[in-house]
Amino acid sequence: MTGFRPDATELGDARRRVEALVAELPARPGDESFDEPWELRAFAMAVAAYHNGQYEWSEFQLSLIESIRRWEAEGGDAESAPWSYYEHWLTALETVLAGNGVLSDALLDDRTREILATPRAKNHHEPHYEPVAIDPAR
Amino acid sequence: MSSTPIQPPSIRTQEEIAARVKALEAIMIEKGIMTTEAVDRLTEIYEKEVGPQLGAAVVAKAWTDPEFKERLLSDGTGTCRELGIGGLQGEDMVVVENTETVHNVIVCTLCSCYPWPVLGLPPNWYKGPEYRARIVREPRKVLRDDFGLDLPDSVEVRVWDSSSEMRYWVLPRRPEGTDGMSERALAGIVTRDSMIGTGVVPAP
């Protein structure tokens, strides 16, 4: 359950391998950080699906370029459609997976609606001031 | 040329996109295209740099500067801001201190609320139903069996439930044998799990 804890060197190597893939893609703005949790998740999923052999990296790359190009062609106006690199990333990932027949828009839409419809639990938007559990010293 | 203005693609909220990404991950896992572990693994590569080293710096400062520590414990959010650390999912952060007699551990019993700005992204086990349920029911056992943290019986275990309004994280104990270490060196030994409370900082 805890997963494994790679040492720093192994992490560094893994990171460099991913960087090598990313180096060929249209640049991410700024300092390559992630603004939202879903961005990092989407990022990791694209690499994982590639490692699984779902597509050639170049296919994903072209799809990403195409999504960005379309946004630019449609005005590229930050006010009408705010720039989000990772929305393009997500679109690219959906596109290549749909192209392979492993994903359909309808299926994804349904699942997304399901997740959005899951009710938020009561009280969850309130601070909890006391420990939720205590295992006393004996 | 049509005079109709170009329709922007439907603008989705962050919540909608996050749900879509979650749905996509669920579908791909069901189809056997990827495993949660593989995605976690890749996430971790990046997590190391967006996250816990910031919390580690805060901890190291608290260990070496008693006044800072006092401020940190009374106002987690404001005091982290002194170091330029804050933002998304860190709006109201409360730091709980481990002592000789009390060990704290954090959870979000309902989803995965987590103090992002100091710890980065939560590991997947933190978000999983198993950890969320069991750490509340049998914290001492989960810490021992799942995390190899065998706390003496003399230590009280407190489990803190983070919500979207208030997020907890743990100020771990400074290990023995670190007296001469610089703040920077100390930051290097603080682990993510020690700030979740599923681990302690090992003596260097």
Image: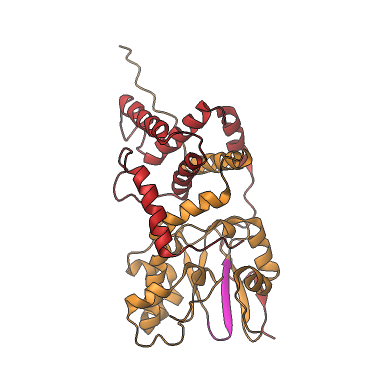
- The residue located at (43%, 70%) in the rendering is B76
* Up/down of A1 relative to B150, above or below: above
Residue A82's spot in the image, x, y percent? 36, 37
The image quadrant where one finds the N terminus of chain A is bottom right
Judging depth in this view, the residue of B124 and A57 nearest the camera is: A57
Secondary structure character of the magenta stretch overall: strand
Residue B11 visible within the image = no
Shade representing chain A: red
Magenta range: B99-106
Using residue B82 as the reference point, say whether residue A134 is left or right of it.
right
* Up/down of B140 relative to A88, above or below: below
- The residue located at (46%, 87%) in the rendering is B176
Image quadrant of residue B130?
Answer: bottom right
Letter of the orange chain: B
Residue A15 visible within the image = yes
Using residue B135 as the reference point, say whether residue A58 is left or right of it.
left
Judging depth in this view, the residue of A126 and B129 nearest the camera is: B129
Judging depth in this view, the residue of B145 and B169 nearest the camera is: B145
Q: How many numbered discs sit on the rendered protein? A: 0
Residue B138's spot in the image, x, y percent? 70, 70
Residue B86's spot in the image, x, y percent? 38, 61
* Up/down of B13 relative to B161, above or below: above
